[in-house]
Image (cartoon, rainbow, N blue to C red):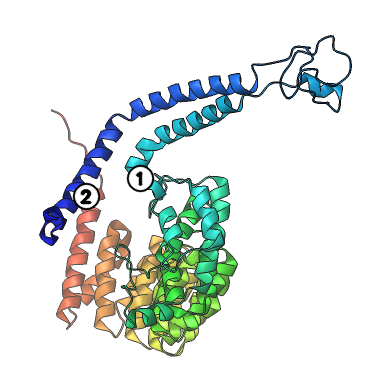
């Protein structure tokens, strides 16, 4: 009784746990011995099975099926020894089965199987040693509220990647049934009500997902990655009426890059959700896998405008997104953002540059004209339409900033040096001092090609604005130095 004293229970349980761990380690270290013993037992069992089932062959002799008396030469089908009457001649040609030996063989086979599985059980436990197809079949029939069977299957695969863990084809087919059922019907609000009544914590300890839902999310995500197919199983959770469950589904979908159009439609539908966290999660999926949402450009654009979000996502949607950006250059509040995003595009649909160049000349506000020519020159600096629009704005636009931006775009175009020099010399007389300063500085960068502009630069060197005069003086000096360096050196006479 002293051994069962409450103060002795903890040390005893600790000793038992340590003993189990030590036994498991020992079994794992000598696993080859168990496999060898199982092989020996299996060979003996098969030998006994042969003796009990196949060895005693009549080999053409007539024998009684009850007492096995040799009836060779005995007329008829009645045994003279025990009196049994047989129905047909084939009944006298049966093999003799020795049931005790057969039962011993089957027992040895079961023992060999148990011995071979001992290291596996010691390493994984009894439940962990059950084949996955059996657990999946049991989960199809029924599972506990916290998904104990699905949790056992999820523990056999990694959370991310496919480096370890595997399911055979039958297990993958079976496990989809309970996973899809749980993703469609899981209700986090019911789980929270259970907790309020004194239940367990609603969240798993490892991945912060609700108990009962985490294993299904893990298996569905893994199957989507493993099979290299669209995550249709995972997306079935978007049909769940519970918004919290859909939130977890969206979080997992952001890691999948193979979204089909129907899944993308369900994600976009969450952008109109009344739950802000679901909208944010859906928008994250759109940002991560933008190319899959090209057919939903209008909906994505409306969401961006309604929530005043950056428009760079539209560029990721491809040509439809770029076309939507081009349509927004006349927007009353987001025109500047649209033009700035267009200037960073790597490729645009045909006609975009021409549309920007025409908009630069016809836009009402100076800001739109300025950034339209800037975006057009960034997209296609060598385009003749861009150069023509830039020179028209630089010559006649009433806003000084627009003229300055247009002149900058013109210098980046593929016009000839002589035409560029002519336009820069004309800009030296512009009313705005920052335009004159830029033109003077840019002429110096042309070097010998701007030699014809020296007189104009000398005249501007007396400009009342110091920075304009300084730029003209430095550029004139730079051009003269370049001309002197390029002149041929006279030959020296040898004595």
124 up-or-down from 426: above or below: above
In the displayed structure, 8 sits above or below 373; it is above
- At which x and y percent is residue 47? 54, 19
Q: Nearer the viewer, residue 238 or 8?
A: 8
In the foreground, 489 or 237: 237
Quadrant of the image for the C terminus?
A: top left
Q: CA distance from mark 2 to mark 1?
A: 85 Å
Q: What residue do we see at 59% from left, 19% from top?
A: 51
Seen at 49% across and 78% down, the residue is 270
Along the line of sight, the residue nearer the viewer: 107 or 340: 107
Find the residue positioned furthest to the top: 73
Q: Is residue 34 rendered to the left or right of residue 327?
A: left
In terms of image quadrants, where is residue 119? top left
Q: Which residue is mark 2?
A: 485
Residue 175 placed where, x, y %? 53, 56
Q: Residues within 10 Å of mark 2 (few under 14, many from 20)?
A: few
Left or right for 374, reference 18: right
| Residue 90 image offset from top left, x and y in percent | 83, 22
Report helix, strand or loop for mark 1: helix
Return the residue at label 1. 124
**Observer-nearest of 368 and 361:** 368
């Amino acid at each position: 009784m002293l051994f069962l004293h409450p103060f002795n229970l903890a040390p005893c349980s600790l000793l038992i746990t340590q003993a189990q761990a030590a036994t498991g380690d020992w079994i794992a270290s000598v696993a080859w011995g168990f496999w060898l013993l199982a092989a020996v037992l299996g060979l003996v069992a098969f030998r006994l099975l042969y003796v009990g089932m196949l060895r005693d062959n009549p080999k053409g002799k007539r024998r009684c099926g009850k007492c096995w008396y040799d009836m060779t030469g005995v007329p008829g089908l009645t045994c003279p020894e025990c009196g049994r009457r047989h129905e047909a001649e084939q009944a006298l040609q049966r093999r003799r089965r020795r049931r005790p030996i057969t039962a011993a063989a089957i027992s040895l086979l079961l023992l060999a199987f148990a011995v071979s599985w001992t290291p596996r059980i010691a390493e994984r436990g009894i439940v962990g040693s059950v084949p996955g197809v059996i657990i999946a079949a049991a989960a199809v029939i029924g599972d506990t509220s916290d998904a104990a069977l699905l949790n056992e299957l999820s523990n056999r695969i990694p959370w991310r990647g496919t480096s370890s863990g595997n399911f055979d084809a039958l297990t993958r087919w079976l496990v989809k049934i309970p996973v899809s059922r749980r993703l469609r019907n899981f209700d986090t609000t019911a789980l929270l009500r259970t907790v309020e009544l004194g239940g367990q914590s609603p969240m798993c300890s490892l991945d912060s997902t609700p108990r009962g839902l985490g294993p299904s999310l893990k298996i569905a995500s893994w199957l989507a990655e493993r099979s290299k197919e669209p995550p249709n199983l995972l997306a079935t959770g978007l049909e769940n009426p519970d918004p919290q469950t859909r939130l977890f589904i969206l979080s997992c979908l952001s890691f999948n890059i193979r979204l089909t159009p129907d899944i993308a439609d369900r994600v976009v539908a969450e952008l109109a959700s009344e739950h802000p966290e679901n909208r944010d999660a859906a928008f994250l999926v759109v940002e991560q896998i933008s190319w899959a949402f090209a057919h939903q450009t209008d909906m994505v654009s409306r969401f961006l405008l309604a929530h005043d979000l950056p428009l760079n996502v539209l560029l990721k949607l491809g040509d439809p997104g770029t076309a939507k950006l081009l349509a927004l250059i006349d927007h009353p509040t987001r025109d500047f953002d649209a033009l700035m995003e267009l200037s960073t595009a790597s490729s645009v649909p045909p006609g975009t540059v021409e549309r920007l160049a025409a908009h630069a000349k016809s836009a009402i506000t100076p800001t739109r004209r300025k950034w339209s020519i800037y975006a057009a020159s960034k997209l296609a600096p060598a385009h003749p339409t861009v150069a023509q629009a830039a020179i028209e704005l630089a010559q006649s636009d009433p806003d000084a900033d627009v003229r300055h931006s247009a002149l900058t775009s013109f210098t980046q175009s593929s016009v000839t040096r002589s035409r560029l020099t002519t336009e820069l010399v004309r800009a030296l007389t512009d009313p705005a001092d920052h335009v004159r300063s830029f033109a003077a500085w840019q002429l110096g960068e042309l070097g010998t090609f701007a030699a014809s502009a020296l007189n104009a630069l000398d005249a501007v060197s007396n400009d009342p604005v110091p920075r304009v005069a300084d730029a003209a003086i430095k550029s004139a000096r730079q051009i003269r130095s370049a001309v002197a360096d390029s002149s041929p050196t006279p030959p020296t006479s040898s004595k």
